[in-house]
Every structure is written in structure tokens, then in C-alpha cells.
Amino acid sequence: MPPLWEISACPTTSMYGAYTYANREDIISPLFATDGQKKNWPARPKLVPGIEPHKKKAKPILPIGHIAVGSIVLQPQAVSVLGDFLCQFGELLDVEYEGGLVYFYNCTNLLQVVDFANSKKSSTGKSIIRPAFLSDAIPASPAIFKDPLTASTSLYITDAARQWMEPVMAAHKLAGLWFYEAGTI
């Protein structure tokens, strides 16, 4: 099977913060759903820096962060470097943040690569805990995509795309994106 990776924003650490919803209703709304469907927001949503309890000030956020599982949020400098590539497989949507804009990446490229029959499932047998993959369905070319079975939790990237992105990100000092082998976490 060709290598397949998942993309995630780096987990929040003691040094860096995260985005959070400006409006509590957005937490349960489909506004930031990561289901692979195009979005048509009636108004531009707003994010704010997450502030830990008992703290007065937010920690700095890396150029690439997240708001929901299976998503990434990019600051303008990250969009200027990665935007054209990412938009081949989805859309960058404007989000208000601290008087400026950040961009929610909504991947709309859906490919069926998860092998449901051979995936590890929950006790009910309905949800996938650890996916197995259909090796023949994984593209060899650079691609970012979601599988309909795991779209709400996983954003996949082919090895060819990862090999392009990692040195580009390093050259532009873009931190915040984490690649890990699909199906291992």
C-alpha cells in the first residue's frame, strides 16, 4: 500500500494556544462541519483565541491551527504559501479573527479509500475506531482528501503531497501542521 498520512494541526501545547468559537451556538451548528461538503455561509463566522481557565491572556497561535477535528485553520502567511495547492482539493473560507481574517480549510475532495469491513470498529460495529484502507484506491499523485466514512474526523494526504508540503513549509517557517501515518492513532 502506498503511504497514506493524516493531517492535523499540532496538538495545543503549553507554549501555543488554539482557536475557539466566538459564538457558543457555533459549537453544535454545522458551520464548521468537516463532512467534505461545500459550504455556503450566510455570514462570515468569527473565532477568538482560546484562553485557559484562570489565565488572563491567550497563548500565541501557530500559522496553522484548528477549530474542529478533521480541520485546519490557516493564518494569511500560510495561505500565501499553501493556498493554491490546498484549493485544488477544497475551499478556503474567510473567518473573522482579532480584527483580521484567518481561513478555515474545508476539504471537499471525497475519495472512498477506507475498507469498512477490515477496519477496527466500536462495540456497536457502526463507527470506525482504526481504519483499514483499500490500497488500490489511494492515489499516487499529490492529493488531500476525506473519505465519506471518516470525513468528520480525518483529513488524509498522499505521500506525494506530504513530500511536497514538508519542505515548502520548512522553507517558509510555517509551523502547526502535523503529519502522522493514517490508521495509527
Image: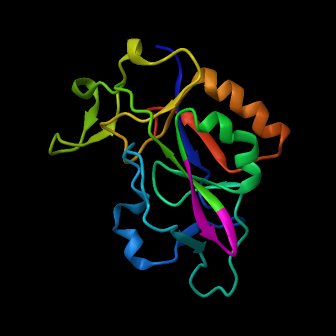
User: Left or right: 55 with respect to 53?
Assistant: right
When the figure is inspected, residue 84 is found, relative to residue 138, above or below; the finding is below
Q: Nearer the viewer, residue 97 or 70?
A: 97
Which scheme is used to colour this image of the protein?
Answer: rainbow
**Above or below for 73 versus 174:** below
Residue 26's quadrant in the figure?
bottom left
In the rendered structure, the answer to whether residue 152 lies left or right of residue 163 reads left
Q: Is residue 13 visible?
A: no
Q: Nearer the viewer, residue 153 or 131?
A: 153
Please tell me whether residue 136 is drawn above or below residue 28 in the rendered image.
Answer: above
Q: Residue at x 57, y 17 (%)?
A: 141
Q: Is residue 56 magenta?
A: no
Which residue is at the far left?
Answer: 124
Q: Which is the main secondary structure of the residues drawn in magenta?
A: strand
Residue 78 pos. (x, y %): 73, 48
In the image, taking residue 181 as reference, residue 111 lies left or right, namely: left
Q: Image height check: is 18 above or below 144? A: below
Query: Is residue 95 in the magenta section?
Result: yes
Could you tell me residue 92's position as x and y percent? 57, 49
Residue found at x 54% / y 14%: 140
Q: Over which residues does the magenta segment extend?
A: 92-101
- Quadrant in the rendering for residue 62: bottom right
Q: Position of residue 5 (x, y in %)?
A: 53, 31
Residue drawn where x is 78% and y is 34% of the image: 168
Instruction: Locate residue 85, reporting x and y percent.
Output: 65, 33
Can the viewer see residue 23? Answer: yes
Q: Number of callouts in the render? A: 0
Q: Nearer the viewer, residue 111 or 37?
A: 37
Quadrant for residue 115, please give it. Answer: top left
Q: Residue at x 42, y 65 (%)?
A: 42
